[in-house]
Image (tube, rainbow, N blue to C red):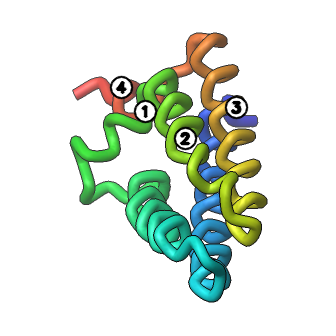
Amino acid sequence: MGKFKLGNWAAMIGMAACWCLIAGGIIGLWYDRRYIAIYSICVGGVLYPLLYPLSFLGPLKAIFHQYYVAAALMGGLSVLCYFLVPTMLAAMVMDISAIVFLISAIKGERGDFFDKQD
């Protein structure tokens, strides 16, 4: 059985949050605070490729393999989404992802970017 990494689970939770951000942002366009809806669509669209396990992004993905930085980013970017009802669920899921990233960083896990022995 392979080694279980919490960081991988945090990335999958973060990808689910990106989909919730995009969907909540589209619904939020009909609310008064459209800037929060546009923000959530942009954040969801930018974070998804960084969290998805793609190899061609290279050094851009390295920031999400440093789990303390990833936890701070996910937690920080979720704050504005709490101020619009359709994006609140996405903000909560992003915070759960940030907590799991933080737990994996405390446990001493490292991302795949640092595991390569070239």
Q: CA distance from mark 1 to mark 3?
A: 13 Å
Residue 52 drawn at (x, y percent)? 48, 58
Is label 1 or label 3 in front? 3
Type of amino acid under label 4: Phe
Residue 47 drawn at (x, y percent)? 44, 57
Type of amino acid under label 1: His
In the rendering, which numbered label is found on residue 74?
A: 2
In primary-sequence order, the first of circles 2 and 3 is: 2
Name the side, left or right, on which 34 lies relative to 59. right
The residue located at (61%, 51%) in the rendering is 14
Q: Mark 4 — residue?
A: 114
Q: CA distance from mark 2 to mark 3?
A: 10 Å
> Toward the viewer: 87 or 31?
31
Crowding at dot 2, Cα within 10 Å, few <14 / some 14-19 / many 20+, comes out as many
Crowding at dot 4, Cα within 10 Å, few <14 / some 14-19 / many 20+, comes out as few
Q: Mark 3 — residue?
A: 100
Q: CA distance from mark 4 to mark 2?
A: 21 Å
